[in-house]
Image (spheres, grey):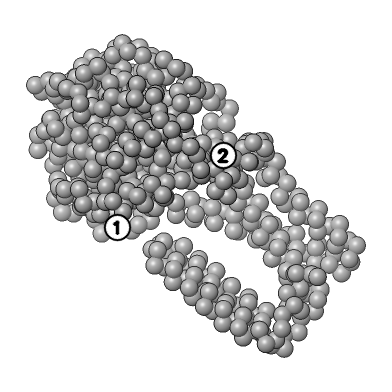
């Protein structure tokens, strides 16, 4: 029985029922998508898709419609080729965009709540995959249509064509993740790796230092803090970030050679939490967030961040980013860990949906203009740093302060190039676009640093620049030794002189280092699982090696002690 010859399998009496079902399904799909506030473009695409489904099924189910078997077979074959092309092109896009060879990193990202950011990749994916698959399908269809009239030719040509469409991306996937990787991905998507044994964890008990139970000695005049977390900024990108390299040569600047991304700190929210608490974020998925939201509590409620320490010392702490902070519950975390005011491209108030966070505005009205409130209008780094200047104009008048800024222009797959950048890409290849984006972002950050230093509060303000993690895409890093990749670290105008030496460290060691560099001394120089780089104590990377540490952290994910630490 030929399933592609659908009209001949249908009975006329079912035509009206099928049409009614198509209409109801199409309207339902559109309404559901619209209510989720996905934005104008995705909603229009959903409406168009719903209409196409309705018209196609109505056309197929209409009474007295005379189909020729060959014509029907051609239509069905074209649709099948189109879907196959779309799957193949989508797979190729995934390979070029996401670090699929790093299975743990990809799965951790997929597990996280992706509100507010995933639409960027959906739009990019559809704009590439849909037109290209249509072109390929139309190109392949004409010779196939000719072959449809010859049964023997059809039996040979059709399988070869469809195999050729899929074999290239399949080979690429196998080359990147191998068979074991495919099995792990299959287990994840089929839900077969969900059940794991929860155990106790002696490692956490041995190495975890809860700062709430330690004394922090604060200098009489600790410095202010401007902390810039640059998206995907790693040492191997510095040749394309000349303005940033110049900051390294300043007599007031020092670094430790860059830090390693580690398990639980390999994407933006994970690294931001690890860099401010000393604790990796190993479990954050829809299930755990459901528990958090139902109980109206924050995750890691009993784990202090460096902002809690600064708040206790009388600091006013502000966080600003240029994208929707619903992504991975970023705003939820920081507003319950010492940040007094959180700004993103949508909000001027801070107590949006967080009962424990107190609303505290520091800026005059007009900080977020009407045109900024478009949910699809993420701020480029230039605009973000302009907003940061406005924040500091007011914030600096209210006593000691900290301002944390997270950039995003240099995000994978090849950056989001600001049209206003002076440096333009040589051509439209991902490599050249990424190089131009890196240069542009570095220029804006360097100019912002110099502006801060020129302000009245500049001499008493420390500036720290780190990459949030190493680059997650493939652009510009395919030929780099993966084991030696480090994100940048740069300390400018520290109150306590930093030792000029290279250290092996991870994101967990940054928070205690920042606090001590500002003149806030921590007992035993430990915070969470991190160690201050002022201390002569070895970091976990130096004690165990990066691979061994990552293996231990991965196993800690199902530790009873870790889950209690996160959810209580």
Residue 539 vertical position relative to residue 390 in the rendered view, above or below: above
Which of 374 and 290 lies nearest the eye of the viewer? Answer: 290
Q: Nearer the viewer, mark 2 or mark 1?
A: 2
First-in-chain label (2 vs 1): 2
Q: 253 and 266: which one is in front?
A: 266
Q: Nearer the viewer, residue 216 or 33?
A: 216
- Residue closest to the eye, 221 or 146: 221
Q: Which residue is mark 1?
A: 373
Question: In terms of image quadrants, where is residue 303?
Answer: top left
Q: Which quarter shows the C terminus? A: top left
In the image, what residue occupies the spot 16% across and 48% down? Answer: 358
Could you say where residue 536 lies in the image, as x and y percent from the top left? 31, 11
Instruction: State the residue at coordinates (53%, 31%).
Output: 477
Q: Residues within 10 Å of mark 1 (few under 14, many from 20)?
A: some
Question: Circle 2: is it few (<14), some (14-19), or many (20+) Cα within 10 Å?
Answer: many
Would you name the residue on which mark 2 appears? 100
Seen in the image, is 271 located left or right of residue 153?
left
Relative image position of residue 480 (x, y in whole percent): 55, 26
Residue shown at the point (62%, 48%) measured from the top left? 91
Q: Secondary structure at mark 2?
A: loop
Q: Position of residue 290 (x, y in %)?
A: 36, 52
Name the spot of residue 112 as percent of width and height, x first: 42, 46
Position of 14 with respect to 372 (left or right) is: right
Q: Is residue 542 visible?
A: yes
* Secondary structure state at the residue bearing disc 1: helix
* Left/right of residue 303 with respect to residue 434 in the rendered view: left
Vertical placement of residue 433 versus 306, above or below: below
Residue 257 in sight from this viewpoint? no
In the image, what residue occupies the spot 36% across and 14% down? 538
Q: Are marks 2 and 1 in contact (CB under 8 Å)?
A: no
Quadrant showing the N terminus:
bottom right
């Amino acid at each position: 029985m030929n399933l592609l010859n659908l009209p001949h399998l249908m009975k006329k009496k079912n035509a009206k029922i099928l049409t009614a079902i198509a209409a109801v399904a199409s309207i339902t799909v559109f309404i559901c998508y619209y209510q989720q506030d996905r934005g104008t473009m995705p909603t229009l695409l959903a409406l168009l898709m719903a209409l196409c489904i309705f018209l196609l099924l109505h056309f197929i189910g209409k009474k007295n419609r005379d189909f020729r078997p060959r014509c029907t077979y051609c239509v069905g074959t074209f649709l099948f080729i189109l879907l196959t092309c779309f799957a193949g092109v989508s797979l190729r896009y995934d390979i070029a965009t996401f670090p699929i060879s790093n299975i743990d990193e990809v799965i951790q990202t997929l597990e996280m709540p992706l509100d507010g950011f995933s639409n960027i990749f959906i739009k990019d994916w559809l704009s590439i995959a849909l037109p290209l698959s249509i072109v390929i399908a139309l190109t392949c269809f004409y010779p196939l249509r000719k072959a449809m009239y010859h049964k023997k030719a059809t039996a040979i040509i059709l399988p070869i064509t469809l195999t050729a469409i899929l074999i290239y991306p399949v080979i690429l996937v196998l080359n990147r993740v191998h068979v074991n990787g495919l099995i792990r991905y299959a287990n994840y998507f089929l839900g077969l790796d969900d059940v794991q044994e929860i155990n106790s964890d002696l490692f956490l008990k041995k190495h975890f230092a809860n700062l709430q139970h330690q004394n922090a000695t604060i200098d009489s005049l600790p410095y202010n803090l401007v902390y810039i977390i640059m998206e995907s900024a790693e040492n191997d990108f510095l040749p394309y970030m000349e303005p940033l390299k110049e900051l390294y040569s300043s007599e007031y600047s020092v670094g430790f050679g860059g830090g390693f991304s580690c398990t639980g700190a390999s994407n933006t929210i994970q690294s931001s939490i690890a860099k401010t608490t000393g604790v990796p974020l190993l479990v954050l998925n829809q299930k755990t967030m459901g528990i958090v939201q139902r109980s109206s509590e924050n995750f890691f409620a009993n784990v202090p961040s460096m902002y809690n320490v600064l708040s206790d010392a009388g600091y006013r702490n502000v966080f600003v980013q240029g994208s929707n902070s619903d992504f991975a519950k970023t705003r939820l975390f920081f507003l319950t860990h010492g940040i007094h005011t959180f700004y993103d491209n949508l909000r001027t108030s801070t107590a949006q949906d967080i009962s424990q966070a107190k609303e505290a505005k520091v800026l005059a009205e007009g900080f977020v203009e009407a045109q900024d409130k478009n949910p699809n209008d993420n701020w480029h780094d230039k605009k973000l740093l302009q907003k940061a200047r406005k924040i500091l104009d007011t914030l600096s008048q209210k006593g000691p302060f900290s301002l944390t800024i997270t950039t995003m222009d240099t995000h994978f797959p090849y950056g989001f190039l600001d049209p206003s950048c002076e440096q333009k890409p040589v051509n439209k290849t991902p490599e050249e676009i990424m190089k131009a984006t890196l240069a542009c972002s570095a220029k804006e950050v360097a100019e912002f640093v110099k502006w801060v230093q020129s302000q009245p509060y500049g001499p008493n303000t420390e500036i720290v620049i780190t990459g949030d993690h190493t680059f997650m895409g493939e652009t510009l890093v395919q030929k780099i030794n993966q084991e030696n990749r480090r994100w940048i670290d740069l300390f400018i105008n520290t109150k306590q002189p930093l030792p000029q030496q290279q250290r092996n460290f991870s994101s967990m060691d940054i928070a205690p280092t920042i606090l001590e560099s500002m003149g806030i001394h921590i007992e035993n120089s430990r915070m969470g699982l991190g160690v201050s780089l002022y201390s002569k104590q070895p970091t976990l990377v130096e004690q165990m090696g990066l691979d061994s540490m990552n293996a231990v952290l991965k196993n800690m994910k199902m530790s009873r002690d870790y889950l209690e630490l996160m959810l209580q």
